[in-house]
Image (cartoon, rainbow, N blue to C red):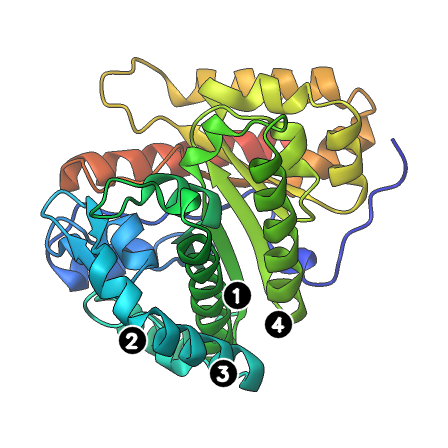
Amino acid sequence: MSAITVSRATQLLPRCGTTGIGSLPHTQLEMAMQMGFQVDVPYLPQLPIANPGEFMIPAALERLPGLRGDAEGGITIDSGEWAAKRSAFGEEVEAALASGDLRAFEPTPASARAWNPFLFEVEHRHLMLAKVQLAGPATVRWYAKTSAGEVASDVPELDRQIFRLLLARCLAMVKAVRRAGATPLLYLDEPGMYALDRGDPRHLLVLQEMRLMVVALQNEGALVGIHCCSDTDWSALLDLGVNLISADVRLSLDALLDSGPALSRFIDAGGVLSLGIIPTDLSASYRSDELVDAVDTSLRATFKDERTYREIASRSLLTPACGLAMRQVADAEHVFEELRMAQRRFRALAGA
């Protein structure tokens, strides 16, 4: 493995810093905001229990013609309404992307109640980094269905329009965080990547489009991560040009670290591991120190040179394994307390 290249933006990341994945179980905005700012990289809290429009798929597709949601976060796209309005909406999306004025595609209180309060706090606290997240283009297009029962990715014009909408929304969020004075850290949430099949030409096209999205976001000054809480073809994700890869360490760390040349390319380019180190499955039995020791052992086995190991470990971010929306508030508080304990031990082992 060659010398690690660390970009100026990546150097902003705190050593063995903590952040959250996104969703929280709170119904009170103020409490959620407090939790979102009690980590090293403050993050935008999403609160779907109080507002189903904040579940990941409806939040990502806000404003899409024909979008219908239910109380559990499921969505349907009314085929007739979308067909009637798709041209006008598509022209609006393309005009915004061409002009660079994307404010109309920022989240509204219907999809992110914390959005404007979050930006206010980012600006007035003079933060260097702020994390936001959005469901990624693979998961959204493979999950969303029309009223005719078709998967969105099987309807070419709808598939393309969803991708362009997600690009506009991601760029709008990044631009807003930059206007607030911080470097944006944007995670694309891609649990649907468990279904990735590089033998499927359509999946290869999705990967190409994601590379374009990552470059567009980085050109706007963002650090870009991909979060996948399921197992996947990690080599494919590592080669997307992202700055961070986020995984559930108990489920996927060993597979991720076994990615061979793709992992080397990612690390050599300054890529950062975002380690979902604290389980969000409340039935799991664990001790945070044992989890940290297991991660440390896996990293040392992969990066055998002590200097390389310390550099990679100390640049890692630590997070819960996934979002916490479906838990109790007390459970979320416990997870973040465990995260702080894990951070102290991990810093000691990594010499950070």
Q: Quadrant of the N terminus?
A: top right
Q: Secondary structure at mark 4?
A: loop
From the top left corner, tell me how far across and down residue 206 is, in percent: 57, 45
From the top left corner, tell me how far across and down residue 74 is, in percent: 19, 44
Q: Secondary structure at mark 3?
A: helix
The amino acid at mark 4 is: Glu
Alpha carbons under labels 2 and 3: distance apart: 24 Å
Q: Nearer the viewer, mark 1 or mark 4?
A: 4
From the top left corner, tell me how far across and down residue 139 is, in percent: 41, 42
Q: Name the residue that disc number 2 marks.
A: 116
Alpha carbons under labels 1 and 2: distance apart: 15 Å
Image disc number at residue 184 = 1
**Residue occupying the point 34% across, 32% down:** 338
The amino acid at mark 2 is: Asn
Q: Name the residue that disc number 4 marks.
A: 220
Q: Nearer the viewer, mark 4 or mark 3?
A: 3
Residue 181 at least partly seen: no
Q: Is residue 23 left or right of residue 315?
A: left
Q: Name the residue that disc number 3 marks.
A: 95
**Residue occupying the point 9% across, 47% down:** 71
Q: Secondary structure at mark 1?
A: strand
Image disc number at residue 120 = none
Q: Residue 106, located in which quarter of the rendered image?
A: bottom left
Near mark 2 (Cα within 10 A), the count class, few <14, some 14-19 or many ≥20, is: some
Rendered position, 164 above or below 318 = below
